[in-house]
Image (cartoon, rainbow, N blue to C red):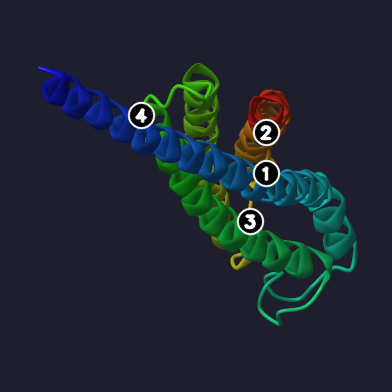
Amino acid sequence: MKHKWSTIFLFLSTLLILTSCGMTQELDESLDLSKELSSVIGQQEALMKDLLKTVEKIQPSFEKDMDAKPDTGLFQDEEGDLYKNFTKRKELLDELTAGQKEVKKFQKEFKRISNKKAVDVDNDKLQLISSSLNIIHNNYDSLILYMNTGFEQEEELYNNLPVDNLEGQGSVIYRTYGSVTMVAEESVSNMEYTASLIKQYEKQAASTKK
């Protein structure tokens, strides 16, 4: 009987040690991920703000180039303020598309760790971070769609100037970029909120490790 209880005790002790090691690994892993994510969120927030500034300059750039009374469409010679602005936004779109993939990767990783239910990890906070990242991912979807639509509208207009319905076509383009502005501003707010969730998690996780 004593041998039986000794065996059970040894088994439970071993299980406890293995479980503790697993929990520590998950806690460390989540902290490493949160530090990486903080850096990515900061970069993406700066990117969104850069996009907002560039979008604000579309109309002034268009008016400046039109004042020069070009003989052909504004993009024929690949020069001018508007062409530079357009090219800059194309570059930002490529960066945003890459950023969306990173955000999705982190969203899946936080969800994976939280689903393990380690007892020394605040799994509820990890789920909140994951859910918040999913919202940001959806913001990217809308932003990319609006920007691609805007590019198509612009190229059709700029390459065919002069046109009789300039005011109408311009209004459509500005409404499209009004939507871009709205979603980009919402994205910045969501990124700031996510950053605050990360800080809260890191603070609590750090105290758990003490």
Q: Are marks 3 and 2 in contact (CB under 8 Å)?
A: no
Q: Quadrant of residue 108?
A: top left
Closer to the camera in the image, 86 or 191 = 191
Q: Which numbered disc flags the more N-terminal residue, 4 or 1?
A: 4
Where is residue 107? Give x, y as percent.
Answer: 46, 38
Badge 3 is on which residue? 163
Badge 2 is on which residue? 191
Badge 1 is on which residue? 41
Q: Which numbered disc flags the more N-terminal residue, 4 or 2?
A: 4
Report how far apart the C-alphas of labels 4 and 1 lie in the structure: 37 Å
Closer to the camera in the image, 177 or 197 = 197
Residue type at the position of mark 2? Met
Label 3 sits on a secondary structure element that is loop
Q: Which mark is residue 16?
A: 4
Q: Quadrant of residue 6?
A: top left
For the C terminus, which image quadrant? top right
For the N terminus, which image quadrant? top left
Q: Which numbered disc flags the more N-terminal residue, 3 or 4?
A: 4
Which is in the foreground here, disc 3 or disc 2? Answer: 2
Residue at 77 percent across and 69 percent down: it is: 84
Residue 51 visible to an observer of this rendering? yes
Indicate left or right for 15 with 85 as reference: left
Label 2 sits on a secondary structure element that is helix
Q: What is the total number of numbered labels drawn onto the structure image?
A: 4
Q: Are marks 2 and 1 in contact (CB under 8 Å)?
A: yes
Residue type at the position of mark 1? Ile
Residue type at the position of mark 4? Leu
